[in-house]
Amino acid sequence: MGLGRPIHEALRRQILTGRLRPGDRLVEGELARAYGVSKSPLREALKTLQHEGLVEAIPRRGYLVTPITVKQVQDLFDLRLILERETAHRAARSAGPEQVAELRRLVGDPYVVGDVDSQARFLAQNKAFHLAVARLAGNQRLVTLLDRLLDDLERLFHLGLDVRDRAQALVAEHVELVDAVTARDPDRAARVVEAQIGNARQMVLEGILEGALSVQVG
């Protein structure tokens, strides 16, 4: 990406963690002064963020952090349910003792409510855990799809964690899934994942609506 890479990474992290909120306006001049750069690398970074769907260009107004729609939330979680219900089912059929031990190691620790850095660490652990489950399904394309999907969901997760304390419950859900995999019970593992994803969906919807964000119904 060239000179715009560090700026892109900094802005992307601010958007994903909610420091820059949906609907926030990004003014080139202000950002250039804040990062001590010319407008050229800044525009390069903004174009990349636009390609990633995190900002949108508004004629004569610059850029806005992309609003979140309720349909976007529903579509992403529907896709997650399709992918992860199947990976959990397959993992419970194939996991051996060493793989189960690895899943238990990746269960993670609770986050601190309101602490963005703590939430970011938890979400990194959460992603590692779910990708480890997916790898047990033995389909690398499925793992790749889930990896990208969890990246797309990161901003939504942060918004949900901001307004609802599910720190202990989320860790307990991971333990419950590992227990189902340990018992080699595919149907139970699939049910556990389905309940987890339903809880996460509800948490995110509550977060974006209660947080009075730039949210669209369509």
Image (cartoon, rainbow, N blue to C red):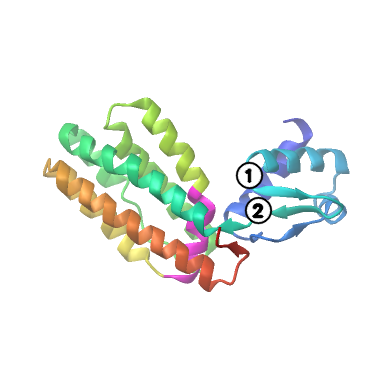
Q: Do callouts 1 and 2 mark residues in contact (Cβ within 8 Å)?
A: yes
Q: Is residue 75 above or below residue 95?
A: below
Q: Is residue 168 above or below residue 72?
A: below
x then y, percent, for residue 209? 52, 69
x then y, percent, for residue 63? 77, 52
x then y, percent, for residue 87? 28, 37
Q: Secondary structure at mark 2?
A: loop
- For badge 1, the amino acid type reads Gly
- For badge 2, the amino acid type reads Thr
Q: Most prominent secondary structure in the magenta stretch?
A: helix
| Labelled disc at residue 16 | none
Q: CA distance from mark 1 to mark 2?
A: 7 Å
Q: Is residue 173 magenta?
A: no
Instruction: Return the residue at label 1.
Output: 53
Quarter the N terminus occupies: top right
Q: Is residue 173 visible?
A: yes
Residue at 81% across, 41% down: 43
